[in-house]
Structure formats: structure tokens, C-alpha cells
Image: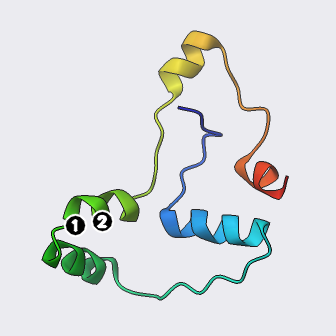
Amino acid sequence: MISDGVDISTSDLLRKVAKAHGVKLNLLPLPVGLMRFVANLFGKGALADRLLEIYRWIVLKQRDLLGWQPVSTMEKQLRK
């Protein structure tokens, strides 16, 4: 796993990718509980859990073991 050490939600990631590509993004402001409820109705609760949580890559052990530090941020890479 590679991370610049910043936690990000799925909606924030979508906003950043859209902005980097100059695309207008319209996300519906739905309560997370409602989205989980609907996903569970369709048997997609586990998928909703993965999409609705903040991604937190635990890279401390790998970083310490390899001595790796990010050379850039996600924002800089998305602009490229």
C-alpha cells in the first residue's frame, strides 16, 4: 500500500478526481444511514461499508521497514 498519510473519504476522493479532470460533479447529499439501509435491502451492505468509510491505509510498518516517505501528495499527482 502507498499513502501520503492523509485519510480520505470516498466522496472527497471523487471530488478531487473530478476537479483534477475539470469535470463538474454532482453528489447527492444523502445520509449515510439511509445509503447503508438501501444497500442492505439489495444485499450490498458489505460493499456500502467499504465505499462509505474513510480509507485509512496503515503503512507505518512498511514505511519504517523500507524507510520510504512520499515524495508528493495526492493533490499534486491528481493535477498531473
* Residue in the foreground of this view, choosing between 23 and 72: 23
Q: How many marks?
A: 2
Give the camera-side residue of 65 and 1.
Answer: 1
In which quarter of the view is residue 17 placed? bottom right
Q: Disc 2 or disc 1, which is closer to the eye?
A: 1
* Residue drawn 30% across the image and 79% down it: 35
**Residue extending furthest front?**
42
Q: Amino acid at mark 1?
A: Lys
> How far apart are labels 2 and 1 at the CA level?
6 Å
Residue at the extreme top of the image, as rendered:
65
The relative height of residue 39 versus residue 47 in the rendered view (above or below) is: below
In percent of width and height, residue 64 lies at 57, 16
Q: Residue at x 81, y 51 (%)?
A: 76
| Residue positioned most to the right | 80
Where in the figure is residue 26, as x and y percent of width and height?
59, 87
Judge the density around disc 1: few (<14), some (14-19), many (≥20) Cα neighbours within 10 Å: few
Please rate how many residues cluster around mark 2, counting C-alpha atoms within 10 Å: few if below 14, some from 14 to 19, many from 20: some
Q: How is the image coloured?
A: rainbow
Where in the figure is residue 75, as x and y percent of width and height? 75, 55
User: At 60% from the left edge and 47% from the top edge, which residue is drawn?
Assistant: 6
Image side of residue 52 versus residue 15, left or right: left
- Residue 43 lies, with reference to residue 47, above or below; the image says below
Label 2 SS = helix
Taking the image as shown, residue 56 lies to the left or right of residue 53, namely right
Answer with the quarter of the image where residue 70 lies.
top right
The residue lying toward the viewer, choosing from 58 and 45, is: 45
Marks 2,1: beta carbons within 8 A: yes
Q: Residue at x 38, y 65 (%)?
A: 52
Residue under pointer 1: 44
Give residue 48's mark. 2
* Identity, as a three-letter code, of the amino acid under mark 2: Ala
Position of 57 relative to 46 (above/below):
above
